Amino acid sequence: MTTYKKLIAKQFNQDFRSAVEIVEVSLTDPTDSEIVIRNKFAGVNGGFDTLICRGEVPYINPTPPFDLGVEVVGKVVAIGNNVTDFKVGDPVQTIMRGGGYREYQVVDVSQAIKIPEAIPEVLTLMPTGVSSVLALEQVGEMKSGETVLVTAAAGGTGHIAVQWAKLAGNHVIGVCGSDAKVELLKRLRCDRIINYRQENLDEVLKKEYPNGINLVFECVGKKTFDICVDNLAMRGRLIVVGFISDYGKNPEQVQQSRIYGKLLWKAASIRGFLNPLYKEYMPAARDRLFDLFYSGKIQVAIDPTEFRGLESIPDAVEYLIGGKNCGKVVVRF
């Protein structure tokens, strides 16, 4: 009987590396409506990975041990008797909790998405890029002619958000933390790039954007979040897409005036985005992204650091959480 390896969370733990282990399991044959996929590339979502291993994802209540990883690209290696839409060798993607950090997966055919080719760029388009599109359009109600600020702008989600806001005809500010990330944002035609390690974000915004920011795509949290709130324009909107500065750490206790004192007088708003709550919009957003990617109108950045095999996943998670990535972090199998 064929066996394969997967990464599981053996226990809840504040430290991702201490929470996980690699186990070997048997590969089952597909039922009539299932396919077997050999995983090739898995996307790393350090924030979600860390929070779920801490038991801090409110809409999920897993009991250890449980499978990890969400997004993966691979190829079909076996099909069930009733499967007609897929054949052996087809490139596919799955986006479901527990399907990513493993060498093989057996899934119902309804869970598989046929894709043009099994390349890591697909992981940046779906679901990462789709999240950028839905957050900006559905939650942020992005228009044209606005000033849009993207934090963690050179990350997997952020660099797609930058391009989407530019395509919509906006002035885009990208916030990042290294020279390599600055160069990436230059290639993406970002209008103003702020390296927060070399410039004071608050001072730059107050001096260069005295009327404030219309729309903020915020992924960082802590001080960056506070600065973005302070610099919202009249009727400005801030989308909370994540708070990576808090992932894997004890939450910071904040003592300051309640935030409604900052929002009311500007008629500004803070809005949360969570991908699973916008599923009905995903297929159309995915198709738009794929069309733009294959027509050369959107660039996809894959972080050049190579992570290979299940053993490398803890390193990849820490690398992403540490803000070292430039583009999407991918593990290769």
Image (tube, rainbow, N blue to C red):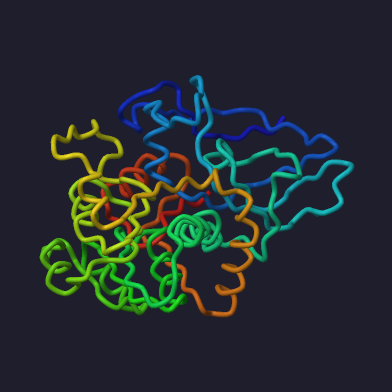
Asked whether, in this view, residue 235 is left or right of residue 120, the answer is: left
What's the residue at 23%, 57% (across, down)? Answer: 228
Quarter occupied by residue 256: top left
Asked whether, in this view, residue 52 is left or right of residue 266, the answer is: right
The number of numbered badges drawn on the structure is 0
Residue sitting farthest toward the front: 265
Between residues 253 and 233, which one lies in front from this camera angle? 233
Quarter occupied by residue 174: bottom left
Between residues 38 and 206, which one lies in front from this camera angle? 206
Relative vertical location of residue 191 with respect to residue 24 in this rendering, above or below: below
What's the residue at 60%, 48% (across, down)? Answer: 279
Quarter occupied by residue 35: top right
- Percent x, y for residue 214? 32, 66
Between residues 226 and 13, which one lies in front from this camera angle? 226
Asked whether, in this view, residue 265 is left or right of residue 187, the answer is: left
Between residues 96 and 167, which one lies in front from this camera angle? 167
What's the residue at 30%, 65% (across, down)? Answer: 149
- Percent x, y for residue 161? 42, 65
- Percent x, y for residue 309? 47, 45
- Percent x, y for residue 244? 30, 46
